[in-house]
Image: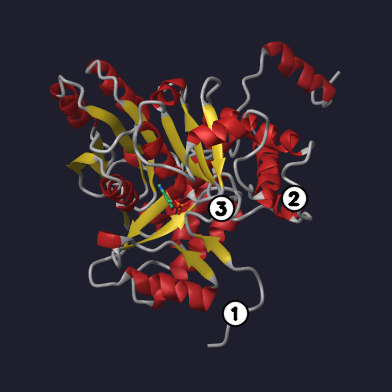
């Protein structure tokens, strides 16, 4: 078959996500001097507004021209010393990669093995933290949303475990596929280092590593002896103080970020979280009631509102579904990674999207599954999602007072007389 050229490619991997036209246009700029007297207006405004997205007023946000992986490294090397001990749960491929990085950087990681499909085991964390009487564990790593399995963990619960154990370890959270799409409360949850990237909920291309750091973690900088250079926060802090960067920033990305933040605040963070949950519920209805397939996430409490990992029946290679979807229907689905390769495919439902865009992904996945011999009834996923979306509100219901109701009714003329 020749290349598909007509129509759009349907991009439903869980990042990079669709970049809104407004953001694409904002990035089409001529290059300019990043040391000009005007540049700090842009940099300080995006750094300030990112604090609102992380929900922190006391934490400081840093932007690196990297991807999320760079921000992982920045978080570790700026606050730890070689040989420091960390506690982490291996719940999927991204939590594995962060653990692997920590080990390669010379930290000792106590790894809690968990079945993929489950979230961070809070009780086990609490036991291990209580047992660490001499406070040798310097940091706890948690992947808020494990993109490989479609599992969201309870960060407030991890903070409670630290508190119950009266443990001072820093709380490191990977918010790469949750920020700006699933509620994330850096200050309230006492998160010390929150890592993210540009190509997911922030609706930008890949290219920015974003890190939010609490005052407690900033205080750890001076004593942290890990070697660092490009990612040294001390250089960033010095340059950012006057609105500049220690090296050439990714300028068009910063203009794009300015526009994506505008879009985020126009919709409102809470409305965005609501929309992601509502869209995710429609996808889950398609998977479970429509196709009668199972999600990798084992319990509803772990269901991710940004990505669904869908297990295919035994004897079918999920990579085949993904390939047919791509080649025949111009639909990009996410692959199963590492130990779940071939066992599942993923539908990303985050960022700039709505019901009908997702209908394209559901319909395309359904056709591709039929093509490779999976017995799903034609139209069953689409029907289940449509039933869910048609019977639920797409936006939070506004709480209106009696006076407002009266006023609204009068101003729209619906009350007679
Ligand atoms: N953490 C999670 C949860 C991710 O989903 C990803 C990428 O998909 C990463 C980290 C790595 O981020 P990046 O690919 O931007 O380096």
Left or right: residue 79 versus residue 361 is: left
Q: Which of the 4 image quadrants contains residue 157?
A: top left
Q: Earlier in the sequence, mark 1 or mark 2?
A: 1
User: Is residue 331 shown above or below 81?
Assistant: below
Image quadrant in which you'd find residue 241: top right
Q: In this view of the protein, which residue sits in the foreground, 320 or 194?
A: 194
Instruction: State the image coordinates of residue 316 (x, y, percent, origin top left).
Output: 28, 72
Q: Nearer the viewer, mark 1 or mark 3?
A: 3
* Spatial CA span between label 1 and label 3: 27 Å
Q: Is mark 2 within 8 Å of ligand 1?
A: no
Residue appearing at x 62%, y 20% in the figure: 399
Secondary structure type for disc 2? helix
Q: Residue at x 18, y 31 (%)?
A: 124
Q: Residue at x 21, y 40 (%)?
A: 108
- Residue 358 drawn at (x, y percent): 54, 56
Q: Which residue bears the numbered disc 3?
A: 207
The image position of residue 176, as x and y in percent, is 46, 44
Q: Which quadrant, please, contains the C terminus?
A: top right
The one nearer the camera, 24 or 222, is 222
Q: Earlier in the sequence, mark 3 or mark 2?
A: 2
Q: Residue at x 21, y 30 (%)?
A: 125
- The residue that mark 2 highlights is 26
Look at the numbered disc 1 and give the secondary structure of its residue.
Answer: loop
Q: Residues within 10 Å of mark 3 (few under 14, many from 20)?
A: some
In the rendered image, which residue does mark 1 sit on?
4
Which of the two discs, 1 and 3, labels the residue nearer the N terminus?
A: 1
Query: Do we see residue 223 in this rendering?
Result: yes
What is the secondary structure assignment of the residue under circle 3? loop
Residue 388 image offset from top left, x and y in percent: 49, 46
């Amino acid at each position: 078959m020749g290349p598909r050229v007509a129509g759009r490619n349907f991009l439903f991997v869980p990042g990079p996500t669709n970049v809104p036209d407004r953001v694409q246009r904002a990035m089409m700029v001529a290059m300019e001097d990043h040391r000009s007297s005007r540049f700090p207006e842009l940099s300080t405004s995006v750094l300030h507004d990112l604090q609102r997205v992380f929900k922190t007023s006391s934490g400081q946000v840093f932007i690196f021209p990297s991807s999320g992986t760079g921000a992982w490294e920045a978080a570790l090397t700026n606050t730890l010393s070689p040989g420091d001990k960390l506690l982490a749960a291996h719940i999927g491929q991204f939590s594995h990669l962060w653990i692997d990085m920590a080990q390669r950087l010379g930290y000792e990681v106590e790894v809690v093995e968990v079945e993929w499909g489950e979230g961070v085991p809070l009780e086990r964390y609490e036991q291990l933290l209580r047992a660490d009487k001499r406070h040798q564990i310097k940091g706890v790593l948690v992947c808020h949303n494990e993109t490989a399995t479609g599992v969201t963990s309870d960060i407030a619960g991890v903070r409670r475990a630290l508190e119950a154990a009266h443990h001072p370890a820093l709380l490191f959270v990977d918010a790469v596929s949750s920020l700006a799409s699933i509620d994330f409360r850096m200050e309230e949850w006492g998160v010390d280092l929150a890592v993210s990237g540009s190509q997911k909920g922030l609706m930008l291309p890949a290219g920015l590593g974003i890190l939010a750091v609490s005052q407690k973690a900033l205080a750890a900088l001076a004593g942290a002896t890990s070697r660092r250079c490009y990612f040294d926060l001390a250089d960033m802090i010095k340059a950012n103080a006057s609105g500049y960067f220690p090296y050439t920033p990714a300028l068009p990305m910063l203009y794009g970020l300015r526009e994506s933040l505008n879009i985020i605040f126009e919709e409102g963070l809470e409305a965005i979280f609501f929309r992601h949950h509502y869209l995710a519920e429609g996808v889950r209805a398609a998977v479970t009631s429509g196709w009668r397939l199972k999600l990798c996430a084992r319990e509803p409490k772990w269901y991710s509102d940004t990505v669904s990992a869908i297990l295919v029946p035994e004897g079918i290679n999920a990579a085949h579904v993904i390939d047919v979807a791509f080649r025949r229907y111009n639909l990009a689905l996410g692959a199963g990674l590492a130990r779940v390769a071939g066992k599942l495919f993923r539908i990303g439902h985050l960022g700039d999207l709505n019901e009908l865009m997702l209908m394209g992904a559901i319909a395309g996945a359904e056709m591709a599954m039929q093509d490779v011999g999976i017995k799903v009834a034609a139209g069953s996923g689409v029907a289940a999602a449509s039933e869910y979306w048609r019977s639920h509100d797409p936006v939070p219901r506004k709480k209106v007072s009696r006076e407002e109701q009266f006023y609204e009714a009068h101003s729209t003329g619906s009350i007679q007389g």
